[in-house]
Image: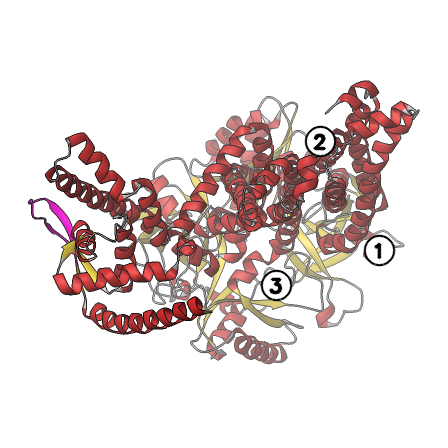
Amino acid sequence: MRIMFGWLKLLGARIREWVAMGRVEEEFSRELEEHLVLLTEENLRRGMTTEEARRAARVRLGGITQLRETYRELHGWIAVESFLQDVRYALRTLLKSPGFTLVCVLTLGLGIGASTAIFSVVNGVLLRPLPYPNHERLVRIGERHPGNGCGLCGGFGNTTYANFNDLERAASTVENVSAFREWSFNLTSGGEPEQVPGALVSGNFFAAMGSKPALGRILTPEDDAPGADNHVAVLNYALWQRRFGADRGVIGKTLQINAESYRVLGVMPRGFAYPEKSEVWCPLVPRGEFRDNRRAHLLTIVADLRASRTIANAQEEIAAIGERIEKQNASEDPDMVLTTVSLKKSMVEPVQPALMVLVFAVGLLLLMACANLANLLLARAAAREKEFSLRTALGAGRLRLVRQLLTESFILAMLGAVVGLGIAAWSLQFIAALDSQEMPRFGEISIDWRVLGFTLLISWLSGLFFGLAPALSGTKADLNTSLKEGAGVSSGASRRGASRALIVPQFALAVVLLVGAGLLGNSFVRLLRVNPGFNRSGVLAVQLFFSPAEYPEGNVRGALVLQQMLQKVRSIPGVRSAGLVTALPIAGGASTDFIIEGRPLPPANDEPSADIRSADADYFQTMGIPLLAGREFTEADNSTARRVMVINQTMARQYWPNDSPIGQHATMKDWGPPLTGEIVGVVGDVKTNGLDEAVGPMIYWPHFQFPELFNTIVVRSDGEPSRLLPAVKTAVWAVNKNQAISKIDTMEQVLSESLARRRLYMILLGVFAGAALLLAGVGIYGTVSYSVSQRIREMGIRIAIGAERGDVLRLVLGQGARAALLGILVGIGTAVALTRLMASLLFGVSATDPLTFAGGAVLLTLVALVACYIPARRAMRVDPMVALRHE
Amino acid sequence: MGEGKSEILQGTLDLMVLKTLAAMGPLHGYGIARRIEQISEEALQINQGTIYASLVRLLQRGWISGAWGASENNRKAKFYSITRAGRKRLASEAENWERISGVIGRVLRIAERG
């Protein structure tokens, strides 16, 4: 970066000097004119005619052009001048062969564009600080339970309210210890009922982030105190603009949120969106037992490092606090560990490995583009050997020639950078379109000054990289030989060798990229083939969030309302069946510890855990989840009936490997007082957290016996499911006109979205691999056909003295193919070492999958053979007579 | 660039320009050239343009300064005058010149005898 600024300053100074030079030179011209006038007058006084006097004056002053030249030299502008001269000359040369220039600029643009696009992503996600004033001090504190595997939380789980309280009191290395729970908000005032994402936050949450409101005020610790006016809300900028027309009068107004009245306190500035996608923030008010709850892990904790404390200090202290809490509450929350990381790290960690793989891949692509360009320039330097010899003979120094050639490379690099920026801007739009709210911080990606600097830097570096070798070799020419030599038999043998040598790394790089993309593609195909456990086609899923004020937890009124809605939905023409579940497959959901009645109690820290859902009688049939034993739920399993549960196949196999679970009892430990139910049925497994995750035990309750606030109506239709949407909405609103509908998807979309990240990685790497294949093919084609054109006469002679045409074909083909094969071998070795780095991105294939490796190698070999065959055929068809006369 | 020309010749002209400005006060390029020709009694017919190369060199070293003013026929012209640093330089250069010319004279006489 600093180098770049230095260069810019120098350039600025040069330009200023150059502009000033115009003025100074003008003055000098005036001075000389005046001198001429005075000389002419003197001559006139001596009796010359006007004409004679003027001429004599000019003679005595000397050549004006020469004087100006000397003047400039004395002012030291000659370096700038000769640079500009180089630029002019280079532009002229490049314009003279537009095809060559176009190929170079496009090749380079491809490499620079891909690099810039990926760098923009890395810059936006990994490098740029979080857009909150306290970004340097923000940490996230999470719980881990090393003892029992926690599928979703990836080692960084949420915290209970009691732990949050303990931590806030005890921690001294951090301040503004705040907590939030992601939450849904049904907005019903003004316009259609809308459900927006947001969070219930502790009063010091905004203080921890350090952000100031754009309008009004933020939440303060007074707002979440029990007994105070807790019905207040802060809106984000986008919601304020969209739903309230950017009306400043919204502050102080009362809104209907989750069926209760909330007063708007403030609006956050543009760009404030934490937790991600949040649009509304309300106070997190601990009610009743929740304050002391050590079972419900629901909160995310963020805090600020105190001044002069490091993250290591905080980690140490908070780990110790965690240990103390764990010891005191081992019966309730055993095996609990508190961990601390920077907030940014906690946000971007999941995508970091993939981004690093992409950075690496794009770097390889840029290297390939440079190698291709070096090759093209090498060939061109050979064709211009005579020009250089002539210029050397006329007195140009070698340094001057090298500078000339490097100027050409730099101009190509700059043009490539311009094309590359265009490609990058376009790719970013494409990447943004692919992303379905799956990637952290993707909204922050843009082309900023840092990206521009990066583009400039890599284009200079690549200009130097691909320009230097041809410049040095091109100007090495021995005057005598090259001026005497005829066209076509130049001393280019060593240069051809260099050009062939470039094929090896090119093919090696291409193998690495192809294999990487192949492994990702392979993983993706395998994921698509994974059986999700349900019938994915023809199902529409409509998510509803019930406002707690309207449907207090544990109250069956919500279940009754849902039942009415379902009845209306079932009567829609085209609906085959409709069911209800609390959380869809694939999308994750709640889980609980459980015990099996009648068996010895496991130790407290080793209780088995199961995912937990509530469903209605028609859910399994609607989703196409097979019943394996016992029965499904019926209408009779209502709130007053005997408690029953249905379990999945994995749970049945794991805990009743030899006998039937039907008739056995299990108890759910979390989510309020323990609930015991009789197992009445076993259904097939469905993928819970994604196609790539193993299925664990699952317990279904009848939704009347365990009603929840988050519900999803699933509708199986005869035709295209999304066509039913208007009718389903009408059915829902016919029962409750204020019910917001949060998310509507077909199950196909749910599956597709769950693969969005992988799809993005696969497409990007696939595009890079395709580009690499193209570059490798074009590169070897260029090298071989150049070599053939240089050796036309040799081929002619070979044929004339009796070589079979097949021999010539084999000769040309063999030379290209040998280099390519060597490259492929080197590439395979490199790929074996490198693909291990992407193991975490793979599914169902090993990082050294032999089929993928073989596929990449075969594909590249074919490309090499085809690319060599075209020029080889030309060589074979050489007419010896024409070739020998060719001069 | 200018390396091809003899350093001594350049130096000689610079010295003459400095001396002229010291003796005559502010002059424009034409005036300096005319003055040098007159003093040398027209024996030294210099290419008047070369004065300007000398003026740029002296300006760059800060030995003279230039300013626009009105010439004798009331036109705009650039007038050069010697600076304090220029006077000091003139003194030391003049001394230097005397010494070198003396040495060269002696050397040339030796060469004639030899």
Q: Chain of mark 1?
A: A
Q: CA distance from mark 3 to mark 1?
A: 32 Å
Q: Are marks 2 and 3 in contact (CB under 8 Å)?
A: no
Amino acid type of the residue that numbered disc 1 sits on in the rendered structure: Trp
Judging depth in this view, the residue of A170 and A507 nearest the camera is A507
The residue drawn where x is 39% and y is 56% is A9
Residue A129 image position (x, y, % from top left): 47, 59
Q: Which mark is residue A656?
A: 1
Of mark 1 and mark 2, the one earlier in the sequence is 2
Judging depth in this view, the residue of A817 and A751 nearest the camera is A817
Mark 2 = which residue?
Answer: A486
Residue A183 image position (x, y, % from top left): 49, 52
Judging depth in this view, the residue of A767 and A685 nearest the camera is A767
- Front tag of 1 and 2: 2
Image: magenta residue range? B68-80
Q: Is residue A594 visible?
A: yes
